[in-house]
Image: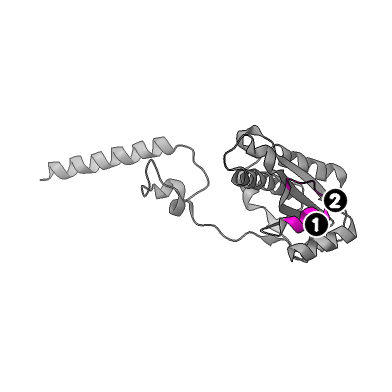
Amino acid sequence: MVELEDFASITTFNDCRNEIIERKKLGRILEAGRNAPSPGNVQALEFVVVEDEETRHHLSEILGDSRVSKAPSSVVLISDVQRMGRRVSDPMEACYSEAAASAQNMRILASKEGLSSNLVTGFNSEDVAGLLNCPEGKVPLAVLSFAYTDNPVKSSSRFGMNQVCFYNEYGAQVSSVFDGFEWEGLREEKEVYHKKAKGIVSKIRKHL
């Protein structure tokens, strides 16, 4: 079961141990990625696991990220854009959405398995496709590198919930509810505020 703390526990790495990731563990991570939401349920996403040292080195050069060559395992997320286009009007946007959801699923599970992960996007997809011998129409969109590290890097801090979430309409905040992680009792808390406000107004009217 995924807890809210699991999202905050995702870490990246700058250096890592030269330790192979167990097949069963990597398999669970890939299953998490495979079960991510897919626009139109097209399921256009495929995966290439890169562990060969020479291929990792070339992939690292294409991405411009030396950490990829250090990591024992990297997963390239590849999308079948043509297949997505048969169901969705903007296939590339839908493919990116599917890849993002899949990557997040994998990173959460990797964290639970004691691994740190780095996500790389925005690279030359044609060069990566050529390196991996991808067929025409199969577009690499993201690369996730997984590793054990003795120096995990925590994610940067996020805006507070009361800065980015509103109640019923934009700008309507209930800060005491949104300040924390828990959303339970939101309706009940609003009713409490409403009753308190009515009580204050009644007291004021009695003294006028």
Q: Identify the residue position indicated by label 1 in the image.
A: 148
Where disc 1 sits, the SS reads loop
State the residue lying farthest toward the front.
136
Front-most of 59 and 116?
Answer: 59
Residue 135 part of the magenta-drawn span: yes
- State which tag comes first along the sequence, 1 or 2: 2
Q: Tell me the CA gap for discs 1 and 2.
A: 8 Å
Q: Quadrant of residue 69?
A: bottom right
Q: Quadrant of residue 40?
A: top right
Q: Identify the residue position indicated by label 2 in the image.
A: 21
Front-most of 8 and 200?
Answer: 8
| Residue depicted at x 80% and y 60% | 59
- The answer to whether 105 appears left or right of 163 in the picture is right
Residue 56 part of the magenta-drawn span: no
Where disc 2 sits, the SS reads loop
Residue type at mark 2 is Ile
